[in-house]
Amino acid sequence: MFGIDTYNMVKDLEQVAHVARKVGELGISKTKVASIAEIGVIDEGKPSDFYSSNYLNTFKNSQSQIAFMCFWLNGTDNSLADSWQVPAPTDSLANDFREFASDSYTLFAGDYEMYTLPGTALM
């Protein structure tokens, strides 16, 4: 896997698309699965269509070859203690994230049973 961690690029979606394309090109050139290993926005005042329009459309239209993307925050700074990279169920962006997640372009771990072959449990 070849990937990059990136944060706080919501204001420049062209930059997000450029980074996604570049990571995809480099990953493919090295025969690796291309990924956005960590992506998130901290305290940016996310628009109401942040996930469905901003991220989803940007990745759909970027021709990026990204096979994996993880919304994540890995930090110990106390100022980030209340930051979420995906909305909590009661957050104002929860429905928008559900729309993002239900799009046929996305695939989440629970969308497909990977650990069972027909008639055989692997785990």
Image: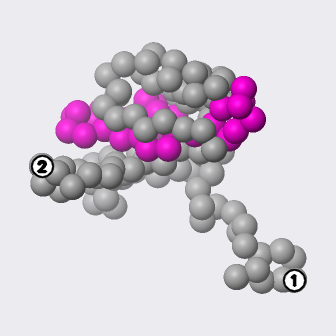
Q: Amino acid at mark 2?
A: Ser
Picture residue at 63% right of the left edge, 44% below the top = 1
Q: Amino acid at mark 1?
A: Gly
Q: Position of residue 25 (x, y in %)?
A: 66, 23
**Toward the viewer: 60 or 117?**
117
| Left or right: 73, with 60 as reference point | left
Q: Is residue 103 something that shows in the picture?
A: no
User: In the structure shown, which secondary structural element does the residue marked by tag 2 occupy?
Assistant: helix
Quadrant in which the C terminus appears = bottom right
The mark tally for this picture is: 2
**Toward the viewer: 3 or 44?**
3
Q: Position of residue 53 (x, y in %)?
A: 46, 31
| Left or right: 11, with 44 as reference point | right
Looking at the rendering, the stretch of residues picked out in magenta corresponds to 27-56
Labels 1 and 2: the sequence-earlier one: 2
> Which residue was labeled with disc 1?
119
Badge 1 crowding class, 10 Å Cα cut-off, few under 14, some 14 to 19, many 20 or more, is: few
Q: Does residue 28 show up magenta in the picture?
A: yes
Q: In the picture, residue 22 is in which quadrant?
A: top right
Picture residue at 78% right of the left edge, 83% below the top = 121
Q: Position of residue 50 (x, y in %)?
A: 37, 35
Q: Does residue 1 show up magenta in the picture?
A: no
Picture residue at 23% right of the left edge, 33% below the top = 44
> Which residue was labeled with disc 2?
79
Please say if the residues under marks 1 and 2 sit with CB atoms less than 8 Å apart: no
| Left or right: 81, with 108 as reference point | left
Up-down: is 87 above or below 48?
Answer: below
User: In the structure shown, which secondary structural element does the residue marked by tag 1 occupy?
Assistant: loop
Up-down: is 85 above or below 6?
Answer: below
* Marks 1/2: CA–CA distance: 49 Å
Q: Is residue 116 something that shows in the picture?
A: yes
